Image: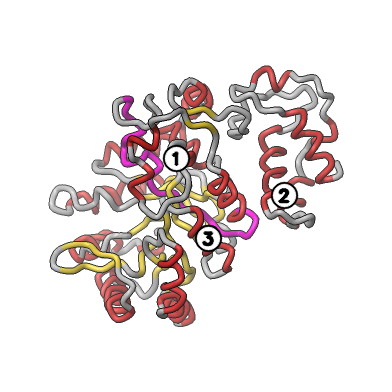
Amino acid sequence: MNYRKLGATGLRVSEIALGCEGMTEDNYAMCAKLFDVAEESGINYFDLYSPDPELRSSIGHALKGRREKFIIQSHICSVWKEGQYLRTRNLDETKAAFEDSLKRLDVDFVDVGMIHYCDALSDWDEILRNGILDYARELKAAGKIHHIGLSSHNPQVAQKAVESGAVEVLMFSVNPCYDLQPASEDVEDLWRDENYANHLTNMNPERQKLYETCQRLGVGITVMKCFGGGDLLSAEMSPAGAALTVNQCISYALSRPAVACVLAGAHSVEQLRESVAYESASESERDYAAAFASFPKISWEGHCMYCSHCQPCPVKIDIASVTKFLNLAQAGGSKDIPETVREHYRVLEHHAGECVKCGACEKRCPFGVKIRENMSEAQKVFGM
């Protein structure tokens, strides 16, 4: 298992993490089975968005004797009423639900307290205004959560939250179909058929800006909906009009700036093992570029996907890394390059200034990226 830094939290998390969607299967017996597979596979991070009391208790039982092996991302403002899940912004309900979660999980703290499901700017304002964020800060000061997070599907809301400095971790929906959709306060727009009726080109710029801002500010991203609820794995259901593999979906998400882990939901032990198998998959099995280039409804013409099909470079420039650092340097709109970006670029073995403009990379690029122009721009930006 590979491990990544979760932003600036100091936590190192398994890049394949565990979602909680399938844990209620088989009358909650699946919960312990999935945690057993997680432990043996080296998964050390999981998300608990559901307020289902039986599920919380089942996870508590599954954690007994191995709490220290798992980093918990649990949600604030997720409540259980009359036998069903609801999101709330009522402070009293929020406090009672969080304390119930600690009790049922049988833990003294959770590592990431995730303010749950904020997809509207007005909702973010309410979180600031009605004491929800203040409560999260109180929990952190008391040691009941160690880091504050926010879950969202809307890049405008997430951008505002990240730029506020209030959140350290962002849970966000990342996959190659949703990344083309503009911001919306209705999450169902991400998979609505009519929104894919016309040919779509290139990543939504607000989403790209969000990922790059998170990288620049040290906010770690934990990915939800990597498989689009399973739709991306089916040619009949996929908004792209073609199926992707589990490995391709995971590889795409992990290649986005600031992404630390993919929260893989599983309804069986076999499904979780399939996600874990990404760790031993070959480069060709992980490669998503050829599939993306052949999508009948979607194209990324001129957009670098960090897929490294442009390699090898005759002077050994890591073209994908140079391009990523160039995008990060330009993301903030400031003339001052963030120190971390500048230093990561500096320690590359070869730099854009060494480009001999042979054009071999551009002939191999599936997306028609003007790589030589990017190398010239990177040399200007970084001075080397």
Please give the name of the residue rendered at 36% of the width and 33% of the height, measured from the top-left corner.
232
Position of 31 relative to 297 (above/below): below
The tag earlier along the polypeptide, 2 or 1, is 1
Position of residue 371 in the picture relative to residue 86 (left or right): right
Identify residue type, mark 1.
Answer: Asn
Residue named by callout 2:
329
Q: CA distance from mark 2 to mark 3?
A: 25 Å
- Quadrant in the rendering for residue 300: top right
Q: CA distance from mark 2 to mark 1?
A: 23 Å
Please give the name of the residue rendered at 65% of the width and 19% of the height, measured from the top-left corner.
364
223 is within the stretch colored magenta: yes
Please give the name of the residue rendered at 72% of the width and 38% of the height, measured from the top-left corner.
322
Residue named by callout 3:
11
Residue named by callout 1:
175
Image quadrant containing the C terminus: top right
Label 2 crowding class (10 Å Cα cut-off): few <14, some 14-19, many 20+?
Answer: many
Please give the name of the residue rendered at 72% of the width and 29% of the height, measured from the top-left corner.
371
357 is within the stretch colored magenta: no
Q: Secondary structure at mark 2?
A: helix
Identify the magenta region.
215-235
Position of residue 191 in the picture relative to residue 59 (left or right): right
Q: Secondary structure at mark 1?
A: loop
